[in-house]
Image: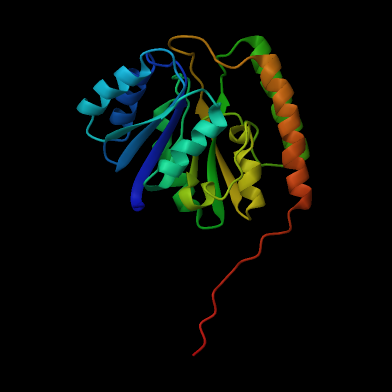
Amino acid sequence: MMTAAMISIVIPCKNEADNIPPLLDEIEQHLRDRQIEVIVVNDGSSDDTAGVLSLEAAKRPFAVRHIRHQFSVGQSLSLRSGVLAAHGAIIATIDGDGQNDPQYIGPLVDTLLEAGPAIGIACGQRIKRKDTKLKQLSSRFANWLRGSILNDKTRDSGCGLKVVHAEIFRRLPFFNGTHRFLPALVIQEGFDVVAMDVLDRPRRFGTSNYGILDRGLRGALDLFGVWWLKLRRNKMPIAEEVHDG
């Protein structure tokens, strides 16, 4: 059952067992006054993610739910699993590697709600990036290219910190790359975008599961696909039910 006051925090992760406890500590610290649930989507991890989540769920004042994929399907389809399982009317997404700071979830939620019904998504935009120079340059180019083609009203679509109305999130097409195009896809549904600067942090433990070349090649194909959807999509009408009498 969907709860209007609840925020569902969806964390897609693969082999992030060491990063999960401190991330949950921060979520508890910064969102202690909010009604939340945390949905960790374990994307075919080979480490002790399952055992860590079992221990964490027993000691947290909020629900920690474990959605497990039998094999890895990627970040976007992991988000899909979490979004479909969510009980909250608002869904916040955050990466599982600790680079996204949970202190921004509350302000992003407030920004989305205060912006009114015309706004469908509030996006974090990373500043003071902590990635390698090569990764920063590739990300900067990808964001410039995406923004030029899609006009998605954010300079950093790849930031994992996003807050979306659940009803809108569930309308979006999901493919292996959706997470990089959420603002553009929300705009295609007839809603607008707000953005907030957020400080980036270095990864705490482990290494990234995504390579620059692999991500770049797939991202180019995904960009073409989203551009095609944009061209083919009619302007979304405002649909209102008419009651006679």
Q: Left or right: where does residue 63 sit relative to residue 141?
A: left
Residue, far bottom: 245
Q: Nearer the viewer, residue 128 or 237?
A: 237
Report how many numbered discs are placed on residues in the image: 0
**Residue at the location (67% across, 21% down)?**
215
Residue 147 horizontal/vertical position (percent): 72, 36
Judging depth in this view, the residue of 243 and 114 nearest the camera is 243
The outermost residue toward the front is 70
Q: Residue at x 31, y 23 (%)?
A: 53
Tell me if residue 64 comes above or below residue 91 in the rendering: above
Seen in the image, is 244 located left or right of residue 147? left
Q: Position of residue 26 (x, y in %)?
A: 33, 25
Residue 109 x, y percent position in the rendering: 43, 43
Residue in the picture at 64% in, 45% down: 185
209 lies above or below 224: above
Q: Is residue 192 left or right of residue 55?
A: right
**Image side of residue 28 versus residue 105, left or right:** left
Residue 108 visible to an observer of this rendering:
no
